[in-house]
Amino acid sequence: MAERPARKPRKPHSAQVVRTERLTPHMQRVVLGGAGLAEFTAGTCTDHYVKLLFPAGGATYPEPFDEERIRAEFPREQWPVTRTYTVRAWDQEHRELTLDFVLHGDEGLAGPWAARVQPGETVHFVGPGGAYAPDSGADWHLLAGDESALPAIAAALESLPDGAVAHAFVEVSGPEEEQKVDSDVEIVWLHRGAAPVGEKLAEAVRGLDFPEGRVQAFVHGEAGFVKELRRLLRVEREIPREDLSISGYWRLGHNEDGWQASKREWNARVEAEQEGSAPSA
């Protein structure tokens, strides 16, 4: 059996909170800056993400923050806890990184942190990662997701040139969660209410009269509806894999640790189930 490759060291960035803003009742914006972002850079991907590193169980780490040292000297249960968030915006000139957080009251780790954090506080993170950006060669664009995908969808829409054809669907809990996006594309806001997450989103995308031509699709959010829309787009609509950016950001009943641990197996199972009836790429 081949040995797993050694984990590559990752150099964290350290940044300070510059300001915060409550965008909607359940969406909090945190803007990071400071000298620690001197080496940070982001490319053209509109789904860039960073992995925030939170102290586990109230642990105090030596300064300067060194994740490799922490992993070597601290017991595993005190290693930093990772939470992944999409980059809403990166201002290269002012070196400010904007992250938006979905709030669920006191539930979770990153949300409560974002709701209470004050300017001047330090946060450590690694990244960015990312793989998607709107392709200028596509005839039209389809973007669909829940609150967790809204930052990436908004960034993608704002990157589109004037006149680009796009259909964007975002499911939120209610009208109070809608946001202003600087784009001439009109977002179809779907208000979930008491319905299951993703139900109205899947219905809306399925009911779309697809324009002619090559579509590039970005579909992210809760894994259950993502699976359903993957079948619609990949199997029923026969959209090639290379024109799809589609994955579950989260899954009902799982925190990020549990979802990340099972995500690869889930994705492999979904792909095996659906690719048997999908067209050859």
Image (cartoon, helix red, strand yellow):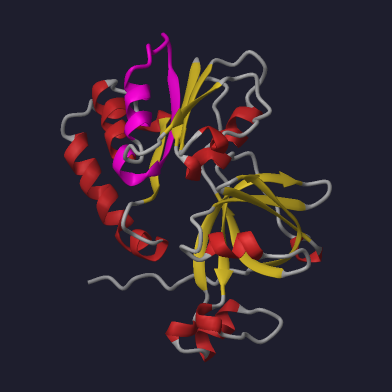
Q: Which residue is at 17% across, 40% downward?
A: 273
Q: In this picture, is 85 found above or below 281?
A: below
Q: Is residue 226 magenta?
A: no
Residue 164 appears at what percent x and percent y?
59, 16
Magenta segment = 199-225
Q: In this picture, is 262 found above or below 44?
A: below
- Quick check: can you spot residue 68? yes
Considering the image in quadrants, where does the C terminus appear?
top left
Left or right of 96, for residue 105? left
The single residue placed furthest to the top in the displayed view is 212
Residue 172 appears at what percent x and percent y?
47, 37
Q: Is residue 219 magenta?
A: yes
Pick the front one: 249 or 146: 146
Q: Which residue is at 76% across, 52% downward?
A: 96
Q: In this picture, is 60 found above or below 208?
A: below
Q: Which residue is at 28% across, 26% downward?
A: 232
